[in-house]
Amino acid sequence: MLFEAERFESRLTKPASWEDCAFRYCDFAHINSQGGSIDSIFVGCTFENCEWYWGIFNLAILVQVKFKGCTFRGTAFSGSKFVECEFTDCEFTMDNLNGECSFDDVAWYKCRQDNCKGLEGEFRNKH
């Protein structure tokens, strides 16, 4: 299902879900998500002050997406593609069982990070 130029605050509203959807130019703010798979396509979206706990970004595609002040706890990014994405003031931390975020087979293309904890080793700021 396609969602275009919508704002989601505090929660996703049905029929939107993190699975099998396409989001273009959408804004997400203050959404807390626990578990579940995120395998949708995101283009030109912004995530502000969102939190994921045990989320699984499995083969998600993110193009020109901005993450601001987001927290990822024990989140797995498996086979996801990040193209021209920006991460500002984000944290990639352990969950309550000391499980770290994982980045297996992730592709980073022209992404940037500024003041992020736990993402330093994944890619370097390149233009």
Image (cartoon, rainbow, N blue to C red):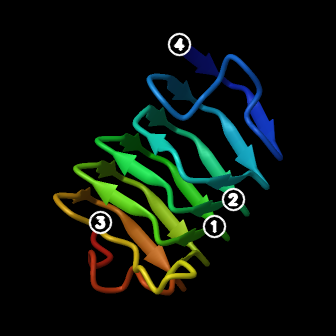
Circle 4: residue type: Met
Q: Residue at x 34, y 58 (%)?
A: 77
Label 4 to label 3: alpha-carbon separation: 32 Å
Circle nearer the N terminus (2, 4): 4
Does 101 sit left or right of 31 as displayed? left
Crowding near pointer 3: few (<14 within 10 Å), some, many (20+)?
Answer: few
Earlier-in-chain disc, 1 versus 2: 2
Mark 4 sits on what residue? 1
Q: CA distance from mark 1 to mark 4?
A: 25 Å
Labels 1 and 4: the sequence-earlier one? 4
Measured from the top left, where is residue 4 in percent x and y? Answer: 62, 20
Residue under label 1, please give it. 70
Of 91 and 127, the residue lying toward us = 91
The image quadrant of residue 103 is bottom left
Residue 62 rendering spot, x and y as whole percentages:
40, 43
Question: What secondary structure is marked by label 2?
Answer: loop
Which of the two residues, 53 or 62, is positioned nearer the viewer here?
53
- In the image, is residue 52 above or below residue 101? above
What's the residue at 48%, 62% (across, down)? 86
Disc 1 to disc 4: CB gap under 8 Å:
no
Q: CA distance from mark 2 to mark 4?
A: 22 Å
Type of amino acid at the residue the image marks with label 2: Cys
Q: Residue at x 60, y 32 (%)?
A: 25
Of mark 2 and mark 3, the one earlier in the sequence is 2
Label 2 neighbour load within 10 Å: few <14, some 14-19, many 20+: many
Placement of 24 over or under 85, stated as above or below: above
Mark 4: which secondary structure? loop
Q: Which residue is mark 2?
A: 50
Figure quadrant of residue 85: bottom left
Residue 127 circle label: 3
The number of numbered discs placed on residues in the rendered structure image is 4
CB of mark 1 within 8 Å of CB of mark 2?
yes
